Amino acid sequence: MKTARKVIINEFGGADNMKLVTAELPAPAPGEVQLRQTAIGLNFIDIYQRKGVYPLPLPTGLGHEAAGVVEAVGADVTDFKPGDRVAYMNAGLGAYADYRNISAERLVSIPAGVSDEQAVALLFKGITAQYLLRKTHVVRQGETVLIHAAAGGVGQILVQWAKALGAFVIGTAGSAEKCRAAKERGADIVIDYSKENWVETLLAATGGKKADVVYDSVGKDTFLKSLDCAAQFGLVVLFGAASGPAPAIDPELLNKKGCLFLTRPSVFPHNSDPAVFKANAAEVLEAIRAGIIKPSIGRKFALADIAAAHKTAEARATEGATIIIP
C-alpha cells in the first residue's frame, strides 16, 4: 500500500481551509489504474467548490484534472500499462494529490510531442473551449465572436481556436497587460472591460458590428453588457461567473435586445459519457500537437502551496493556466 498526499476541505470558505493530509492508497481496484501525478490543473470551478458556491458533501477533495504516469493497473484494464503517460478530467474530485487511483475509462493517452504540463494546461480548459466552439455554437468561417476574459486560460484557447475556424475575434480583458496577451494570441480587436463605456468603445472599433456569439465566463460584471454586444438573433453563452453570479433577467429583455438566444451550459454533461469524453479529449490533444492551440502557463505552485495558488487565481492576478506540481 502506497502513502499519498492529498488536499481536503472540511468546511467551505477561504483558501486556508484547504489542508494537505497524508493517507494510505490501496492497490488499484478492477478497472482502475494507479497514477503518479506529475502536474495538476487549477480551474476556477475549484475555487467555487472550495467556497461553497457549488456545494459538495464534506469532507471532500478538490481538483478535476491532472496528468501523470501509470504505476500499476487493476484487473480488467487492457488499454493502459505501467509507464504510460495519461491525463484526465471529470474523474471525480481529488486531483489535488501526488498519487491517485483513477477509473481507466476516464483516462486519455498523452501523445508524443505534448508534455504533461501542456496537457494539464490545456485539457480541461481545451475541452471547455471544444464544446463551446464545436457544440454550443458551431463557429463558422466569417462569423464574429466575442470572448470575455480573453487572456485567461479558457479565453486564450477560445481565441486561438476560433481564429483557426475562420472567425473574426473580439476579446475583452481587465487590464492593458491582459489585453496585450489576448492580442498576442490572435484576437483581432481587444477591449479593456475595466474601463467605463467599454461597450461603446467596442462598437466603435467594429464599426457598429455586433457578435454572432458572445462567450461570457465573467458573469456579474459583464453579463448585461454582453446582451448589448450580441447581434440580432445572436447567442449569449454564459459559462462562468468569475466576478460573481450573473443577475437574473426577465426573458422579455432578450426580445428587446434583438430576439437573442441565451444558454448556460456546463462542461461536465458534455463529457459525462466516457466514449464522448475520450473523443473530445483526443480532439483537444490533437489541436495541441498540431499547434492550433498553444499552452500558456502563467504560474506554477507546489502542492503544499495550494492556498497561495487559489488566492492568486481568485485575485485574477494570473494569465494563462496555473499549474500545481505535486
Image (tube, rainbow, N blue to C red):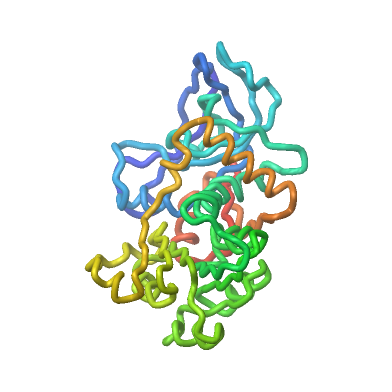
Q: Is 163 on the left-hand or right-hand side of 46?
A: right
Q: Is residue 62 above or below residue 310?
A: above
Q: Position of residue 87 (x, y in %)?
A: 60, 36
Q: Residue 308: in sight, yes or no?
A: no
Q: Residue 86: in sight, yes or no?
A: yes
Front-most of 274 and 324? 274
Look at 40% across and 52% down and name the residue there. 265
Front-most of 198 and 32? 198
Q: Is residue 75 above or below residue 90?
A: above
Q: Is residue 317 above or below residue 108?
A: below
Q: Quadrant of the C terminus?
A: top right
Q: Position of residue 165 (x, y in %)?
A: 64, 59
The quarter of the displayed image where residue 238 is located: bottom left
Please give the count of numbered marks on the rendered protein: 0
Q: Is 41 on the left-hand or right-hand side of 111?
A: left
Look at 63% across and 39% down and name the residue there. 282
Q: Position of residue 187 (x, y in %)?
A: 62, 71
Identity of the residue furthest to the right in this view? 113
